[in-house]
Image (cartoon, rainbow, N blue to C red):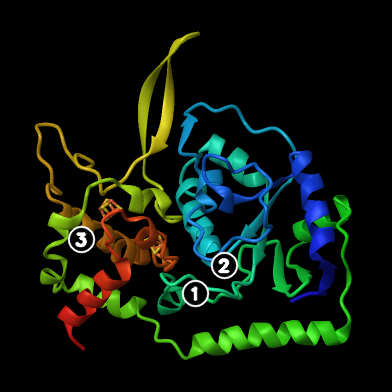
Amino acid sequence: MNMTLVTDREKLRAWLEGLHARGRAVFPFLGPRAPRGMPDRVFPEPGSLASIKGLLLPAESLLDEPPAAGGPLLVWGVRPCDMKGVALIDEIFRKGFDDPPYEARRSRMRFAGVVCREEAPTCFCGELGVDRTDGAGMDLLVVEDGAAVFIRPLTKEGEAILSRFEAPFEVAAPSEEAGIEEIVAGIREARRREEVKGPRILKALESRRAGDALTGIADTCLVCGVCSFVCPLCWCFDVKDVPAAASGAVRVRCWDSCQLGRYARMAGGADPYLDAGARVRHRLLHKFVYIPRTYGMTGCTGCGRCARACPSGLDLREILRAVLEEAGP
Ligand code: SF4
Ligand code: SF4
């Protein structure tokens, strides 16, 4: 990594507040419907449900949304697991076809990510090979350490943000820099001891030997779609015409979910995913087989949001454990 800079929390907060007031900083961990407010704390709580997805793909937006005006926008407090979501959603919306509203939103974003020092009980990113210190895709990497906050520019755009917006950082002393290296090395060492299960899950699901593990889900799932809506790696959307006073109607793009009934219904009424068990199975196959085969990355980062949000208490970790058990060694 490059040079390390340091400041204290008060100065950081004042700086972010100033940027926010000028429309130059957003905090995705606040929630998809209120991503522009200034939070009480400037780092995401472990287990916060909201993610960067609400900024990249708003829950509802006009299909012909006019391009977002303005210069660079600092997206503060993104975790390494969520940056994997940005990478995947970029694959979908930036490659192969043009999506001007997405491109207009995305091209302004400069990511200040945080080294993840605290897990929620439902996190299982290590099992899926996510490095909690990984700065991939970020422009700035931030490490909290007591009252001090350290920041490392990882790209020229990150450096430009700090100088253009007069960030209150000083160059860290060599002893402070060594302290940060120690924190990062400690997190990586803890991760090295965990088994990465992604390839085993892919094999188990691909062999189609995970039928019984999903038995009972059809009776438990409430078909609400919340697991998809909170997932930073789910991007499905629907298009609807909504009445509007001025023009009669506007065309709106809104989140959709493969967990909702009739998602896959075809003309004539045929539907391959009639029951919830079939839909959950499809979701697993999509995230752990089809996406890895197509994009070379898993469609889940183990952030645990779906388990925290499910009103029925369905926990993806338990489902995956059952799948692995059923598949055997
Ligand atoms: S959040 Fe839970 S209940 Fe709702 S669709 Fe997903 S698995 Fe089913
Ligand atoms: S499937 Fe669940 S655990 Fe995996 S990325 Fe989506 S919300 Fe997180």
Of the numbered discs in the image, which one, if any, rests on residue 80? 2
Classify mark 2: residues with Cα within 10 Å, few (<14), some (14-19) or many (20+). Answer: many
Q: Position of residue 251 (x, y in %)?
A: 42, 23
What's the residue at 77%, 40% (across, down)?
21
Q: Secondary structure at mark 3?
A: helix
Judge from the rendering whether residue 159 lies leftward or rightward of residue 123; answer left or right. right
Q: Residue at x 65, y 82 (%)?
A: 184
- Given residues 100 and 159, the one toward you in this image is 159
3D distance between C-alphas at marks 3 and 2: 27 Å
Q: Are marks 3 and 2 in contact (CB under 8 Å)?
A: no
Quarter of the image that includes the N terminus: bottom right
**Residue 212 placement (x, y as % from top left):** 10, 70
Q: Which mark is residue 281?
A: 3
Label 1, secondary structure: give it: loop
Q: Is mark 2 within 8 Å of ligand 2?
A: no
Q: How far is mark 1 from mark 3, CA to CA? A: 23 Å
Badge 1 or badge 3: first in the primary sequence: 1
Q: CA distance from mark 1 to mark 2?
A: 8 Å
- Assign the C terminus to one quadrant of the image: bottom left
Q: Amino acid at mark 1?
A: Val
First reached walking from the N terminus: tag 1 or tag 2: 2
Earlier sequence position, callout 3 versus callout 2: 2
Say whether residue 190 is visible.
yes
Residues tagged 1 and 2 counted as in contact (Cβ below 8 A): yes
Q: Which residue is mark 1?
A: 130
User: Is 311 placed left or right of 272 in the picture?
Assistant: right
* Residue 19 higher or lower than 78, as above or below: above
Type of amino acid at the residue the image marks with label 2: Pro
- Asked if labels 3 and 1 touch by Cβ distance under 8 angstroms, the answer is no
